[in-house]
Amino acid sequence: MEIAPQGKPPVCKIMDYGKHRFEQVKREKETKKNQKVIEIKEVKLRPNIEDHDFETKAKNGERFLKGGDKVKVTIMFRGREITHPELGRQLCIRMAERLSDFSAIEKPAKVEGRNMTMILVPRVEK
C-alpha cells in the first residue's frame, strides 16, 4: 500500500508488493554492478634490491594501479638492516617517483616493527 499524505484529502493506492519488491531488487543490482571494489595489492622489497628486480616490482605495482587497486609497498628488514631505515625510505621515495605517473601517496613511509610500509593510490584521470 502506498500513501501520499501531502494530497488533499490523503490518498492511498493498493499496489502489487511482489512487483514492487522485484523492481527494488533490480535497482539494487544495477547500482552494485557499477561499483568497483578496491583491493590493496602488496609489493614486497628488501633494502639492498638490485635494479632489475626493482624494475620488475615497479612494473607489478604499475599493473596493479592501472587495474584500479591500491598498492602497499613493504620493505622488509632482516637482522641489522633495521639500523638503516634511511635506505628503506630512499627505496620508498624511488618507488613513488617511478610510479608517480599512475599514483599518488596516500600514506607516506612509516616503520612498523621490522617492516616499512607506504600506500599508493591510483591517480584519478580528469
Image (spheres, rainbow, N blue to C red):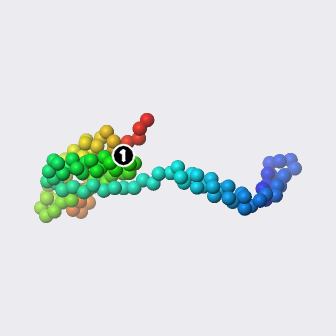
- Residue 47 is situated, as x and y percent measured from the top left of the image, at 16, 54
Q: Is residue 11 left or right of residue 76?
A: right
Looking at the image, the residue that sits furthest to the left is 80
Does residue 25 appear in the picture of this structure?
yes
Residue for point 68% across, 58% down: 22
Residue for point 53% across, 52% down: 33
Q: Quadrant of the N terminus?
A: bottom right
| 75, 8: nearer the viewer | 75
- Residue 56 is situated, as x and y percent measured from the top left of the image, at 22, 50
Looking at the image, the residue that sits furthest to the top is 126
Q: Is residue 17 left or right of residue 57?
A: right
Q: Quadrant of the C terminus?
A: top left
Residue type at numbered disc 1: Lys
Residue for point 52% across, 49% down: 34
Does residue 108 appear in the picture of this structure?
no
- Residue 98 is situated, as x and y percent measured from the top left of the image, at 25, 42
Specify few, some or many for label 1: CA neighbours under 10 Å numbering under 14, 14-19, or 20 or more.
some
| 49, 60: nearer the viewer | 60
Q: How many marks?
A: 1
The residue beneath circle 1 is 66
Q: Is residue 88 left or right of residue 31?
A: left
Quadrant assignment, res 81? bottom left
> For the residue labelled by badge 1, is the local secondary structure a helix, a strand or a loop?
helix
Residue for point 30% across, 56% down: 42
Quadrant assignment, res 2? bottom right
